[in-house]
């Protein structure tokens, strides 16, 4: 069974280990609540899909690999829930709402729900497709 609080805790922990300037991480879960893929954002790596989506939604400068897209690229089964978290240098959770580029990747990937840390560290859950 999927435990949202535990999923956020794991994602925050992963974000804290991110060596990037922007400490973000994403974990994908299948319909059983099992983690199936995870990734950090990167300010040195990119991927053709990142660039293609960035141009498509009008943000051609956002070519560095975002955590959500990196995790979606690595997923080898259907994604039910995508969880993304950001932490500040002091370890405090911060806003991690997927950007327009990542929202398009999420939509195209058939993700059912997205959870992310909010501005004050709260957990925000959104149903993507209503399935």
Image (cartoon, rainbow, N blue to C red):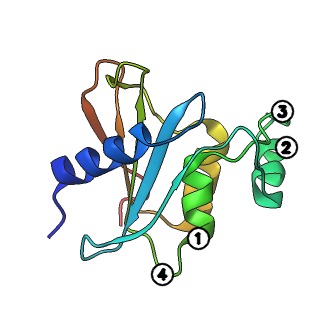
Which residue in the protein does label 2 denote?
55
Task: Tell me the quarter of the picture where residue 27 sits.
Answer: bottom left
What residue is shown with label 3?
61
The Cα–Cα distance between marks 1 and 3, rounded to whole angstroms, is 23 Å
Which mark is first along the chain, 3 or 1? Answer: 3
Q: Are marks 4 and 1 in contact (CB under 8 Å)?
A: no
Badge 3: few (under 14), some or many (20 or more) residues near its Cα, within 10 Å? Answer: few
Seen at 29% across and 36% down, the residue is 124
Looking at the image, residue 10 lies above or below residue 49: above
Q: Earlier in the sequence, mark 4 or mark 2?
A: 2
User: Is residue 51 found left or right of 87 in the rendered image?
Assistant: right
Q: Secondary structure at mark 2?
A: helix
Q: Mark 1 falls on what kind of element?
A: helix
- Disc 2: CA contacts within 10 A as few (<14), some (14-19) or many (>=20): some
Q: Nearer the viewer, mark 1 or mark 2?
A: 1
Q: Which residue is mark 1?
A: 74
**Eye-nearest disc, 4 or 2:** 4
Which numbered tag is attached to residue 77?
4
């Amino acid at each position: 069974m999927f435990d949202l609080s535990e999923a956020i805790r794991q994602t925050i922990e992963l974000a804290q280990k991110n060596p990037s300037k922007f400490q973000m991480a994403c974990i994908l879960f299948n319909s059983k609540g099992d983690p199936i893929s995870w990734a950090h954002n990167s300010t040195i790596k990119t991927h053709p899909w990142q660039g293609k989506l960035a141009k498509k939604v009008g943000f051609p400068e956002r070519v560095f690999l975002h955590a959500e897209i990196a995790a979606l690229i690595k997923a080898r089964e259907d994604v039910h829930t995508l969880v993304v978290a950001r932490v500040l240098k002091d370890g405090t959770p911060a806003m991690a709402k997927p950007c327009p580029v990542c929202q398009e990747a999420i939509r195209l990937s058939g993700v059912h729900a997205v959870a992310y840390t909010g501005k004050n560290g709260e957990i925000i859950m959104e149903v993507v497709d209503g399935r």
